Image (cartoon, rainbow, N blue to C red):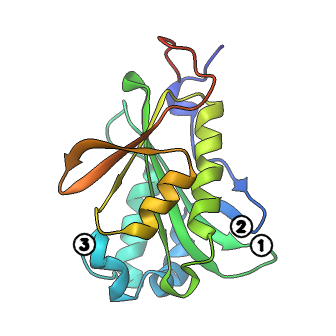
Amino acid sequence: MRRPPVRTVGAARLGSARLELLPLHVGHAEEMARVLGDPVLHEFIGGAPLTAGALRERYARLAAGSPDPAVVWCNWVLRLRGDGPLVGTVQATLTPARDTAELAWVTGAPWQGRGYATEAARAVTAWLARLPVGLLIAHVHPGHHASAAVAAACGFTPTPHREDGEIRWEHRPPGYPAGQKGL
């Protein structure tokens, strides 16, 4: 299968039954500051909520892309269909030389428990499988049962590997030929 050059890969607009996954841009910072502003969200991911200004700066860096030409950052915000509010984010960090993508997701506290993170992560997982990417990775805090459920629902399985105290989960997309390099 012919693959696009790595630098042509970018966060495409994606969708699911209830969500639009929009490529992240600086203009999302104000609304996302409210979505991500609950300190409880940071219990497992660390840090503290960022102000809208700090998010604008962060989103400008993310939108500019990885400073490492061997790595591609793809970031989305999650919007409820029908002009609904933003409810979270999904990101994928692609490393084509390793044939891997690392995924992460966050849903704002008011929208948790409704399956939005699973729906968004499944959309990104399917998109990555079509690129194709041979190995998908997620790191989940051992006490974050909701995030572990999202990973499992997307076909990831936990491994014995730990990084910064988090469990490494892996998923090999079905039908990916053994030994084939993606991207």
Could you tell which of marks 2 and 3 lies nearer the N-terminus? 2
Out of 152 and 61, give the one closest to the viewer: 152
Amino acid type of the residue tagged 1 in the rendering: Arg
Could you tell which of marks 2 and 1 lies nearer the N-terminus? 2
Q: Residue at x 62, y 69 (%)?
A: 116
Callout 2–callout 1 Cβ contact below 8 Å: yes
Per the image, the residue denoted by label 2 is 19
Q: Residue 157 lies in what quarter of the image?
A: top left
Q: Is residue 92 left or right of residue 16?
A: left
The Cα atoms of the two marked residues, 3 and 1, are separated by 29 Å
Amino acid type of the residue tagged 3 in the rendering: Gly
The percent position of residue 107, horizontal first and vertical second, equals: 51, 73
The percent position of residue 51, horizontal first and vertical second, equals: 36, 85
Per the image, the residue denoted by label 1 is 81
Q: Is residue 129 left or right of residue 163?
A: right
Amino acid type of the residue tagged 2 in the rendering: Leu
Residue 98: image tag: none
Residue 46: image tag: 3
Q: Residues within 10 Å of mark 1 (few under 14, many from 20)?
A: some
Q: Residues within 10 Å of mark 3 (few under 14, many from 20)?
A: few
Could you tell which of marks 3 and 1 lies nearer the N-terminus? 3
The percent position of residue 126, horizontal first and vertical second, equals: 64, 42
Out of 123 and 144, give the one closest to the viewer: 144
Residue 166 higher or lower than 127, as above or below: below
User: Helix, strand, or loop for circle 2?
Assistant: strand
The Cα atoms of the two marked residues, 2 and 3, are separated by 26 Å
Q: Residue at x 61, y 29 (%)?
A: 174
Q: Residue at x 66, y 13 (%)?
A: 1
